[in-house]
Every structure is written in structure tokens, then in C-alpha cells.
Image (cartoon, rainbow, N blue to C red):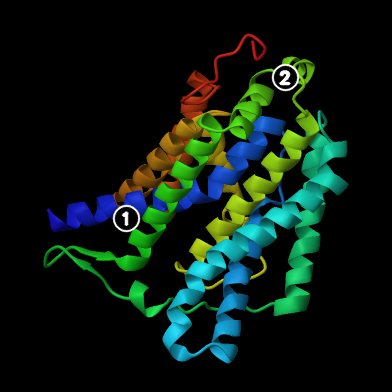
Amino acid sequence: MGLLLLQLFNGISLSSILLLIALGLAITFGLMNVINMAHGEFIMIGAYMAYTIQQIFQKYVPASAFGWYFIISIFVAFGVAFVIGWLLEVTLIRFLYGRPLDSLLATWGVSLVLQQLARQIFGAPNVAVKAPEWLEGGLALGTDLMLPYKRLFIIGLVIVCITIIYLYQYHSRGGRNMQAVMQNRSMASCLGISTRRIDGQAFAFGSGMAGIAGCALTLVGPIGPTIGTYYIVDAFMVVVLGGIGKIIGTIAGALGIGVLSTVFEYTTSATLGKVIVFTLIIAFLQWKPSGLVTMKSRALD
């Protein structure tokens, strides 16, 4: 029973990581229909921000306060990725709306540029981020069940991010404007909503969420200039499976992929398990191309 619960926890933990990675992409892809291949590089930016803040704390901050660096790095990662995402939207993305193939090629080129900049600044080899002491160890619930504090922290961080997104979308004027633009862009524009401003805010916010995801990934393993390329396919897979434009669909897609991947990898092998999950997703999308949850709107019909 302890081993079974551990595998279930591993599946939920993997789901939380996938969800944190895909949240920002669900906002930008669902709102603007932009295929942002540079989303993985915003994850990289967040990861390197955690590494930078760690280096600053090690040199200039007393050792007794070192544990606070990771909390600060989360806000720094969001802020830096937010600003870079806003600049990218203003200088490039806003000229590519309605041209998905052009946006794919352009953002892919941006991803290569950002990777090369990371190599120039931080070097090509991977670097490690040391977790604070309060995240070391785990919660023992039995002889066969140990829940690592790092994974529990990531799950808690995902819950906080989802709560913030929910409150913003459904309990704020900006969030309701964003939903209006997502459902019927032309009608929202006729009612006086600045769709360009909403697009810029949404793209920047989605980039900031990717930065938080990169910061959280430093707790899982080492980071490097290509860390984003390992997760970009999974992020798109979660968004497409969940359904475009609905956060609840993204949550369901991440939970399903994470749990199924853990189950199949445990019963077969890592490679075969991933093949089985991909096959099931392809079969499901053949049956329901719109994903698990769809947005109801006459404009979309």
C-alpha cells in the first residue's frame, strides 16, 4: 500500500510540474492563438534567475538568511520573464497575429537567440541550484512512504498560482476583459476593450508564469541553456489535451498525463510508458479534437 501511494504521489507531483509549465502557454495560446516556441526559453530565464539570486545571496547575504533566497527568486523570475515577454510582444508578436505559421518560425528563432545568450552569460555546462535547508528531507508517513519537501512545495506553489489566476480571471475587471477578448475579439473591441493592451498583458503574464515554472524546476535537477526544450512538447500536449482557453481543462490534462505516465513507466519502462501515453492522447484527440474542456461561444462556432 505504501508503494502504491508513493507512485500516486509521484504522478501528482509530475502533474503539478507539467501544469506549472503549461499554465502560461494556456493563457497565450488560448487567448492569442500564437504558437510560442520560445515558451521553453522563458522557463530557462526563470531557472537562471534562481541561480543568479542564489549566487548573490552566497556572496553578499549572511548565511543565516540564505534560506530566503528561493522565495525571493520566485518573484524575481516572474518579474524578469514578465518584462522580457512584454518586450517580445511589443516588438515582434503583435505583428504576427493571425499568422500562426509565421509566429511559430519567429518564436523558434527567438528561442535560439535566447539560448545562445544564456550560453554567453552563464556558460554551456549545466549548473545546479542548492535548495534551502527547509526544503531538504521529506515527510515520513510510513516505512515505505516518504514525501519529499521539494515536491510538496511545488504542489503548493501550483495551488497558489491556480488560485491567483482564478481570482484574476473571474473576480477582476482585467480578467473579465481577457475572457471577453478570448470568446469574441471583435465584439470586445466594439465595446471599447483595448484588445492590443489585453494581448500584451496576457503574453507578459504567461511569460511570467513560465519564469515561475523554471524557478521551480531548479528543485528537480540541474539547469542549462536547453532546459526549456525538454518541456515545450509536454506543455503543448497538456494545453491541446485539456482544451484551448480553459484553465480547468489544462489542470485535467496535466493530471491525466502525469498520473498515466507514472503508472505506465512503473509497469513497463520509461520509454514504452511515454509511447503508450502519446498513443492514448492521439487516439483521444481523434475522437474529441477540441480536448477535454471546450469554450462555449457562438463566435468560436
Above or below 266: residue 169: above
Which numbered disc flags the more N-terminal residue, 1 or 2?
1
Can residue 19 be seen here? The reply is yes
Residue at horizontal 49 percent and vertical 44 percent from the top = 164
299 lies left or right of 285: right
Number of marks drawn: 2
Q: Position of residue 253 (x, y in %)?
A: 45, 36
The residue indicated by pointer 2 is: 188
Q: What kind of residue is marked 1?
A: Asn
Q: Nearer the viewer, residue 266 or 86?
A: 86
3D distance between C-alphas at marks 1 and 2: 43 Å
Quarter the C terminus occupies: top right
Q: Nearer the viewer, residue 80 or 10?
A: 80
Q: Position of residue 196 (x, y in %)?
A: 80, 33
The residue indicated by pointer 1 is: 10
Between disc 1 and disc 2, the foreground one is 2
Can residue 269 be seen here? The reply is no
Q: Position of residue 198 (x, y in %)?
A: 72, 34
